[in-house]
Amino acid sequence: MNQSPWWDKNRHADRRGFLLARAAIKSALRGWFAAENFIEVEPACLQVSPGNEAHLHAFATERIGTDLSRTPLYLHTSPEFAMKKLLAAGEERICAFAPVFRNREGGALHANEFTMLEWYRAHTDYMAMMSDCGAILALAAQTAGTKWVSHRGLTCDPRVAPERVTVAEAFSRFAGIDLEATIGDRDALASAAEAAGVRTGADYTWADSFARILTERIEPRLGIGRATILYDYPASEAALAKRAARDPRFAERFELYVCGVEVANGFSELTDAPLQRANLEEEMQLKQARYGERYPLDEDFLSAVAAMPQASGCAMGFDRLVMLASGAARIEQVLWTPQA
């Protein structure tokens, strides 16, 4: 049987409690950011490049000028490029509740249009973002009246500071794999994955095996009992992040997990413009090889990278945060006007 439209009064009534929680959480977070001296900004959705991550897919459009000239544009997959330009312009603490658009996505945790809570602090590193994530998670749950977050049978106490675990530690703990010994070695990581019971393919790259292990063995074990911050990703999996001083094979990137769900992704921002260009070119080469398409690089963004101060930033799926804090099971329950 087909589901009634979202504007059906009965269906809306079933979702309304989650939507009111969404509004309350957004108001509380705006207050928190204001108290931290952030300025809320509104990055434009139409961009010359939607972002250059190989596995993210954009919606394409075009601008038609008064002379009928046509310029290709995209709806951004993240407000990141625009917000980093604001850092280059001199802003030091900025945040946004930005609508973002991703094609080829759908399901309980994904929507083609959703809200990204993104924020940046100049003159800090990713440790500042980790602390922010813990405070935001606790405030969201408190605002929703939630003492324990539950999702798919897993529970997490949002009031407890997240546990911090390196990616290498997680691979050792949950999969019995020495990541540092296999980094960059396709065959070694594939063999280690098979030994851990994770199937790989003959055509798998090192990154494919890494992602498969992460998805099957690591992520389902994170954020149980308390939130988990998984940090120091291989540099090859962090195209926009600064390399780690302790070991340049890794980067200062982290993700926040709650009940096995990835909620946020943050970095110490990369400010080396030539390296940034090389990283994005590599991402687009991979996209071309895998999907038969590529997106242009934003040359203004690459110029801004060279002018940026050292900074840290984080992108949090606001809808997922609301889901977890309010007890919703599916993302459509916390969207005011969902596609479904």
Image: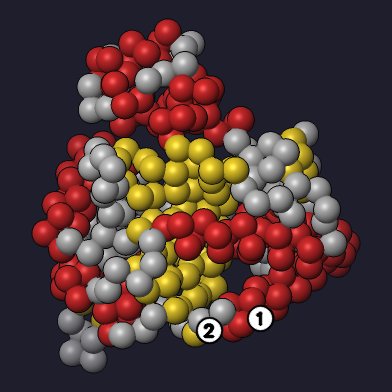
Residue pictured at 49% horizontal, 30% vertical:
170
Q: Give the number of the disc on residue 37.
A: 2
Image point (55%, 60%), residue name: 131
Residue 267, x across and y down, in percent: 39, 56
Q: Which mark is residue 31?
A: 1
- The amino acid type of the residue labelled 1 equals Gly
Q: From the viewer's perspective, tell me whether residue 260 is left or right of residue 304.
A: right
**Disc assigned to residue 255:** none
Within 10 Å of the Cα at label 2, are there few (<14), some (14-19), or many (20+) other Cα atoms?
few
- Label 1: element kind: helix
**Extreme residue toward the bottom, this view:** 66
Q: Earlier in the sequence, mark 1 or mark 2?
A: 1
Quadrant of the drawing holding the C terminus: bottom right
Residue at horizontal 36 percent and vertical 84 percent from the top: 91
**Toward which corner of the image does residue 20 lie, by quadrant?**
bottom right
Q: Residue furthest left?
A: 274
> Residue 182, percent across and down?
29, 21
Give the residue at x 79% y 63%.
142
Do labels 1 and 2 touch, CB within 8 Å?
A: no
Q: Distance between the residues labelled 1 and 2?
A: 10 Å
Q: Which amino acid does label 2 sit on?
A: Asn
With respect to residue 41, does 6 lie above or below? above
Q: What element carries label 2?
A: loop
Task: Name the foreground residue: 191 vs 208.
Answer: 191
Q: Is residue 199 above or below residue 255?
A: above
Q: Nearer the viewer, residue 316 or 230?
A: 230
Tell me where residue 242 appears, x and y as whole percent: 28, 54
Please identify, in this view, whether the residue under mark 1 or under mark 2 is nearer the observer: 2
User: In the figure, is residue 265 to the left or right of 283?
Assistant: right
